[in-house]
Image (spheres, rainbow, N blue to C red):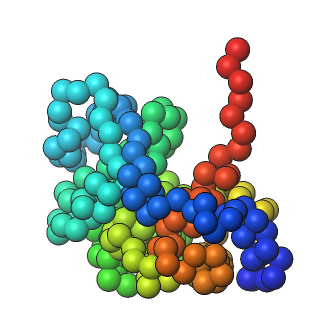
Amino acid sequence: MAVSPENLSRALSVLGPPEKAVAPETVWGQTEIFYPERWTKRWPKNLPLPEFLERQEKALSVSRQRLFEFGESIDTPEDAVSFYVAVCSWGTGTDAQQTYRCVQPLHQPGAPGRLLEGLKVAATGSGEEGYFIFDHSGSAKVKGLGPAFFTKLLYFAAGRPAPADTRHPLILDRRVAAALGWTKTSGWRTSEYSQYLDLVEQLQERWRPDLPTDVIEYTLFQAGRGPNVPSI
């Protein structure tokens, strides 16, 4: 998956005309609804609930901007768990099966401490360093937590990107990979994630160097959603 002229050409085609790029505020305002009960009914007995899961509302919402704010103060394992739940809630939305899958890593021994260790690296290190520590050989690896979700943790823990942050850690999931035309849509190695950041860096330079790179990730994700299916 090395960056090639063909990779760049395809991705630029998916991104579309530069003048039609969405604004960063559109990206950071992306908001998803989730149901706290889908977390609480499967919650590990030994972990305290995040404050927002204790609220009585049937549904809550969270935006990218709120998650950046959440990531500014992660000092304890409990903070790390709360951040993990908030990020995964944004990532799963109302999908019950995906929420169930995101609860499972919290049942693993030592999960809160491992999450905290990984998030501290994500906040201060490179995207590759963050990816490596959460990957299968890393010290923050938690069984059941794969790249599609731990790259979300990396992205938000690193803070809101500026246009000059050309290698800011970005979300990489199945939809983004599909938009890029990759045949491998999960289980990427750290070197492959690095190639993804290489590609995005070059795309930004050629497409819209005045915009942060998460505009590219967002646009690829939207393109990878596929066509809407008519209702019955």
- Residue at x 30% of width, y 63% of height: 68
Q: Quadrant of residue 184?
A: bottom right
Q: Position of residue 54 (x, y in %)?
A: 17, 35
State whether residue 41 is above or below residue 195: above
Query: Going by the image, does 119 lie left or right of 142?
Result: left
- Position of the C terminus by quadrant: top right
Q: Quadrant of residue 18?
A: bottom right
- Residue at x 38% of width, y 84% of height: 125
Q: Position of residue 161 (x, y in %)?
A: 39, 74
- Residue at x 50% of width, y 34% of height: 95
Hey, which residue is sitting farthest right in the picture?
A: 6
Front one among 177 and 114: 177
Front one among 214 and 96: 214
Hey, which residue is sitting farthest top in the picture?
A: 232
Query: Going by the image, does 128 lie left or right of 207?
Result: left
Hey, which residue is sitting farthest front in the picture?
A: 19
Query: Going by the image, does 229 lie left or right of 145?
Result: right
Q: Can see residue 56?
A: yes
Query: Going by the image, does 36 lie left or right of 167?
Result: left
Front one among 69 and 150: 69
Q: Position of residue 92 (x, y in %)?
A: 47, 43
Q: How many marks?
A: 0
Q: Can see residue 173?
A: no
Q: Position of residue 155 (x, y in %)?
A: 42, 68
- Residue at x 42% of width, y 50% of height: 30
Q: Quadrant of residue 81?
A: bottom left
State whether residue 210 is above or below residue 141: below
Front one among 164 and 52: 164
- Position of the N terminus by quadrant: bottom right
